[in-house]
Image (spheres, helix red, strand yellow):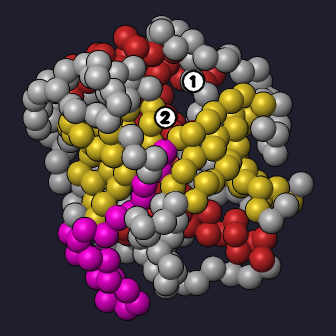
């Protein structure tokens, strides 16, 4: 097994930008070359491009009401606001027990996604789809991918697993406090002259990552869903389409320059995928400009199962 060096403690959160950069580094390592520096997403600049919350201070309220009309899903459950979404998703989590992993096991994930833009620039190409496979350790500390027959492993963010979040009693406040303390302990660096994201924004980023990459027991997922609805700045979006064309409802967070959606099935409230879009122009004054409306990520989970090690399916 080839191992890439793990993320340093000052590495910014694995938002969509950093996830894409990590995948680029995995591909580059497999080719024996460095990725193009034009996007410069890893390390310090990733923090500079990190969402800088302007919405902290008041709980989000509903952005819409009514029934989502989703393709081939006639039993859509009406959701009125972000708190109701959190509660319905939490209740549904208890009905999906899933497979309980053992220590040392990994979660295999297969997803459809829009790949990086053809020109190698920032953002993704919505006209194309690829299938991506990855493995995450159940302790939350490592993520792996099979690139050109080589299994490459690196550190994962936020470095938490089910055992860390399942400490009794499991409550929304408890799981968010565990994540918050972990983030504070990481002492992340965000770049010169740039205001770092608020803790509310970082919490959403971390939950966004955990929901998409970790095998979590129902009680923890329920607490995270309820917790999401209490984070200032998190709102409800009533119709978002994932990379497989499935319509869903979403927990959303809009920062100073980008919006990210955690997409759930509107009937069973299971995790479907993610979407991110640039909401304001960004110019780093040296190498590139990101225009408002640029799609940042689009994914759809196709399969997920617990396996004994990375590389297994």
Residue shown at 33%/46% (left/top)? Answer: 241
Give, as a single range, the part of the protein colored magenta: 280-300
Q: Residues within 10 Å of mark 1 (few under 14, many from 20)?
A: many
Location of the C terminus by quadrant is: top right
Report the Cα–Cα distance between label 1 and label 2.
8 Å
Is 8 on the left or on the right of 38, as rendered?
Answer: right
Q: Which residue is mark 1?
A: 216
Along the line of sight, the residue nearer the viewer: 223 or 297: 297
Task: Work out whether mark 1 precedes mark 2 in sequence or the reverse, and give the earlier one.
Answer: 2
Is 255 on the left or on the right of 303, as rendered?
Answer: left
Along the line of sight, the residue nearer the viewer: 116 or 235: 116
Q: Report x, y in % for residue 79.
A: 19, 23
Q: Which residue is mark 2?
A: 211
Residue shown at 26%/76% (left/top)? Answer: 291
Q: Residues within 10 Å of mark 2 (few under 14, many from 20)?
A: some
Judge whether 10 appears above or below 219 on screen. Answer: below
* Residue 40 part of the magenta-drawn span: no
Q: Report x, y in % for residue 40.
A: 50, 78
Residue shown at 72%/28% (left/top)? Answer: 306
Along the line of sight, the residue nearer the viewer: 111 or 27: 111
Which residue is outermost to the right?
A: 1
């Amino acid at each position: 097994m080839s191992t890439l060096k793990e993320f340093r403690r000052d590495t910014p959160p694995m938002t969509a930008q950093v996830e894409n950069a990590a995948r680029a580094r995995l591909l580059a390592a497999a080719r024996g070359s460095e990725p193009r520096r034009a996007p410069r997403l890893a390390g310090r600049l990733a923090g500079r491009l990190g969402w800088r919350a302007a919405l902290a201070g008041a709980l989000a309220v509903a952005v819409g009401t009514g029934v989502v009309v989703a393709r081939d899903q006639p039993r859509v459950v009406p959701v009125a606001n972000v708190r109701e979404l959190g509660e319905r998703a939490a209740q549904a989590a208890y009905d999906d027990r899933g497979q309980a992993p053992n220590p040392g096991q990994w979660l295999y994930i297969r997803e459809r996604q829009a790949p990086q833009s053809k020109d190698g620039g920032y953002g993704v190409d919505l006209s194309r789809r690829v299938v991506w496979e990855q493995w995450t350790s159940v302790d939350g500390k490592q993520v792996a991918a099979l690139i050109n027959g080589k299994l490459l492993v690196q550190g994962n963010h936020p470095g938490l697993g089910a055992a860390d979040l399942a400490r009794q009693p499991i409550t929304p406040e408890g799981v968010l406090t565990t994540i918050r303390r972990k983030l504070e302990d990481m002492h992340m660096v965000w770049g010169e002259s740039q205001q770092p994201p608020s803790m509310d924004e970082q919490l959403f980023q971390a939950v966004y990552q955990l929901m998409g990459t970790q095998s979590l027991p129902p009680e923890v997922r329920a607490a995270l869903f309820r917790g999401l609805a209490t984070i200032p700045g998190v709102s409800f979006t009533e119709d978002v389409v994932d990379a497989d064309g499935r319509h869903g409802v979403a927990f959303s967070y809009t920062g100073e320059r980008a919006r990210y959606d955690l997409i759930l099935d509107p009937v069973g409230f299971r995790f479907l995928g993610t979407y991110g879009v640039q909401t304001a122009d960004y110019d780093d004054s040296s190498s590139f400009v990101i225009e408002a409306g640029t799609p940042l990520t689009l994914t759809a989970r196709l399969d997920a199962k617990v396996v004994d090690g990375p590389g297994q399916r």
